[in-house]
Amino acid sequence: MGSFSIWHWLVVLVIVALVFGTKKLRNIGEDLGGAVKGFKKGIKEAESEDDLPPKQVADQHTVDVQATEKQDVSKH
């Protein structure tokens, strides 16, 4: 009951390919790769922002928010 051999992994891979299909697996792989690239890009941007000097805040009690107008759906 140790680790699985290469034959076990090949059988699992064939079963997964039969269940999901190769096109769906390719799409999942592309999505996962894009997510990893986006994560790495975000980390690099965050690290570069850490190198910048901190922004000056006029008042310590000011809260910065973005307000949007709420639409009433019942009028339509």
Image: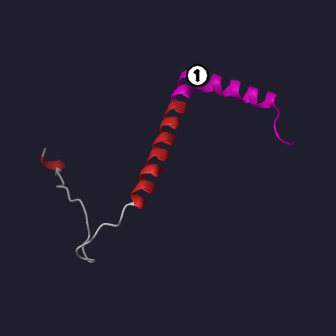
* Residue 4 placement, left or right of 58: right
* Residue 7 placement, left or right of 43: right
Residue 75: give x, y in percent of width and height.
12, 48
Predominant secondary structure, magenta span:
helix
Q: Quadrant of residue 54?
A: bottom left
Q: Which residue is pictured at 59% across the width and 26% down the height? A: 20
In the rendered image, residue 42 lying in the magenta stretch gets the answer no
* Residue 25 placement, left or right of 42: right
Q: Nearer the viewer, residue 55 or 65?
A: 55
Residue 23, placed above or below residue 65: above
In the rendered image, residue 10 lying in the magenta stretch gets the answer yes
Residue on which the image places disc 1 = 22
Secondary structure under the numbered disc 1 in the rendered image: helix
Residue 75, placed above or below residue 30: below
Q: What's the magenta region?
A: 1-27
Q: Quadrant of residue 3?
A: top right
Q: Nearer the viewer, residue 9 or 55?
A: 55
The amino acid on which the numbered mark 1 sits, given as a three-letter code, is: Thr
Q: Which residue is pictured at 35% across the width and 65% down the height? A: 53
Q: Nearer the viewer, residue 71 or 47?
A: 47
